[in-house]
Amino acid sequence: MILRSTDSRTRPTLRRVRSATTLRPLHHRLDPARVEEIPFRAGDGVRLGLTRVDSGDTDRPVVLLLHGHTASADMFLLPETRNLVDVLLDDGYEPWLLDWRGSCRLPYNETGQKYTYDDVALYDIPAAVSHIRGRIGDRPLFVVAHCVGSLTLSLSMTAGLVPGLAGVVSQGVFLTPKLAGRTSLRMSLAGELLRSRIDHIPVDIRRAGLWSKYTPLFALASRGASCPDPTCQILHNSAWGTGASLFVHEHLSEATHHRLAELLGPAPLWILPHLRRIELARTVVRWHDGDHRYRALPQNALDAAARIDTPVLLLAGSENGLWLDSQRLCHDVLARRQPQLDVAYTEIPGYGHLDTFLGRGAALDVFGHILEFLGERR
């Protein structure tokens, strides 16, 4: 006889999340001896990840790589393609990679203390630049930044917190974020309607559970999708439910497509108010107005753009389904308002947003523009 509980109350399924700040291992094909994982904390004490790829040459210029929100340093080290770290090493640079607090190698998007992009601009990026400079001396230091990594870097730069960089490559968005109308609307609705029920949007239905509270989001993302994979649907077809698209599907190799749930993690909903304020202002604005700790950051980064003291290459795919023509807009605005700045714009035909780094042909179609910019200033 099978005994059944007489308690009719349903118990919620426990969701296993990482609560420790231990970094998930990087996935790469480099000789492990060349990859130096450095114990590192941000200026406010938060545990981050900083990785140096040993080039075997102490005279090389250095390039710091900054990922986007919910991504990680893994996006620059894809073992299945010729990745950006490979290209930089072969061209005579020493790559460093920062996993800032929005990295999916860390647990902060799901658990732990909440943060805003002010924290990344004030604590994460300046501390990483300072640490690297302490190791490399007077060698040139470049930065290649993607998406929100680039957006927060612009706030650090206009605050004067990372002076003297040799050059910056900004991919996707920099000082003038611009979203499609439906993306902006969905972002606002999601923030208001969902924040009382969930605190983040996952990308892996296997972890979330087929019959979880996230199932309607995956179902919505599947509408009109040409790919049967739920993770691809919520990223390529919906960008965490916003209706945007993060990449051109055919640019991903099969191996990269299978790894999407590893390369991009859950998107926290509690970051939406800051992102929404930034999008409405069409520039990077400070969130914390009443907290004296953040007074080092400008209230409006575009108004403080004259403080940028390094050449900048604005890079974007012509089919960017998330930030649209933000980079072209940024170039035009800075040309009018700050004509003394050294700012160039390059558009990659046929590319979207993430595939500028994750695409199987990125080494041929994209990375050459980065190397040309760095080479002219090394």
Image (cartoon, helix red, strand yellow):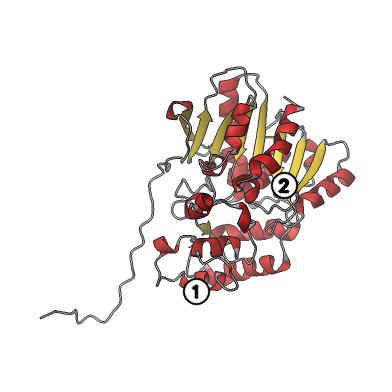
From the image, which quarter does the N terminus lie in?
Answer: bottom left
Where residue 372 sits in the image (x, y, percent)? Answer: 74, 32
Count of numbered marks:
2
Q: Is residue 316 above or below residue 267?
A: above
> Closer to the N terminus: mark 2 or mark 1?
2
Secondary-structure class at tag 1? helix
Where residue 147 sits in the image (x, y, percent)? Answer: 65, 49
Which residue corresponds to the image point at 55% horizontal and 71% vertical from the top-left? 222
Q: Is residue 255 above or below residue 94?
A: below
Residue 216 - label: 1
Residue at the far left: name it: 1
Q: Residues within 10 Å of mark 1 (few under 14, many from 20)?
A: few
Of the two numbered discs 2 and 1 in the rendering, the one whose residue sits closer to the viewer = 1
Where residue 71 sits in the image (x, y, percent)? Answer: 54, 49
Which quadrant holds residue 237? Answer: bottom right
| Residue nearest the viewer, comparing 169 with 289 | 169
| Residue nearest the viewer, comparing 187 with 25 | 25
Which residue corresponds to the image point at 56% horizontal and 28% vertical from the top-left? 131
Where residue 371 sits in the image (x, y, percent)? Answer: 70, 33
Q: Mark 2 sits on what residue?
A: 174
